[in-house]
Structure formats: structure tokens, C-alpha cells
Image (cartoon, rainbow, N blue to C red):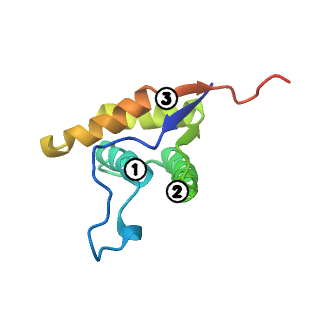
Amino acid sequence: MDKKINLNLDFGIDRTPKEGEDASKIPTNQKVTSNYLAYAVRLANPQGLPSDKRRIWANLEDRLEKAVEGGEDGFTVNQYEYQFIKEAFDKATVPANEAGVFTEVETAVLNAADVDAHPKK
């Protein structure tokens, strides 16, 4: 069964641009979540990814980028992709100063909602 991971997480960060600051340079919640998903994969695989995992990650990364660019609130993954991401969070060792945001994204992964990939008509 497919799962939908929430990308629009509330990190408690003020995203109001300061005077003279370019609002387009302030990352969205979706972009921050995306970056932490990639960070988990890097931390969990310090020696790199084997070929089968590289293909999974390349596909995920491409779709994730499109979801972020499209401003989507969620990102749907199949069971293999979900397991890949979940294992990355299980293996990752995070510096203490990043644990709060990292845990917020990990919780979004663990709480991903089931999505029926083939709804009945």
C-alpha cells in the first residue's frame, strides 16, 4: 500500500522576510522537509548507496523535487520507497543540535497516511 508523507510541516520558524530581504530566498516548509529526507539518506549511508538503492533514491529525489516545486503538501511513496526512507531514519545518527527538526521530519515519515493507489470505481 502506498503512503503519503506530509511535506508541509510546521517547524516553528518565522518565514516573514525582513525588510530588504528577498522572500524567494526563504525556504518553504516543503523544501526544509525535503532537505532533511535527503540528509537522513546521506547520514544512513556514509559509504554511498549500492546500485539498487541508488535507483530507488534517484526516483524518489526526482519526484520529491517536483512535489516541492509544485508546492504540494504531501509526497506519495510506494512500500519499497517508504521502507527505504524509514530505514534511513532508523540508521541515521544525528548531531544533538539538529535532533528537533530531524525528529519532526522522522515523525512525519512514521505517521505517513495510507493511500489507496488503485481506488475502486
What residue is disc 3 on?
112
Across and down, in percent, residue 60 comes to 54, 48
Q: Can residue 93 be seen?
A: no
Q: Residue at x 20, y 39 (%)?
A: 99
Give the residue type at disc 2. Answer: Glu
Which residue sits furthest front? 19
Q: Residue at x 32, y 56 (%)?
A: 15
**Which quadrant would residue 90 be assigned to in this image?**
top left
Which residue sits furthest left? 96
Give the residue type at disc 3. Answer: Ala
Across and down, in percent, residue 25 comes to 37, 69
What residue is disc 1 on?
29
What residue is disc 2 on?
65
* Quadrant in the picture for the N terminus: top right
Few, some or many residues within 10 Å of mark 3 (<14, 14–19, 20+): some
Give the answer, above or below, for where 101 lies relative to 121.
below
Q: Residue at x 45, y 43 (%)?
A: 8
Which residue sits furthest right? 121
Q: Are marks 2 and 1 in contact (CB under 8 Å)?
A: no
Left or right, 97 with respect to 26, comes to left
Numbered disc in front, either 2 or 1: 1
Left or right, 75 with respect to 43, comes to right
- Secondary structure state at the residue bearing disc 1: helix
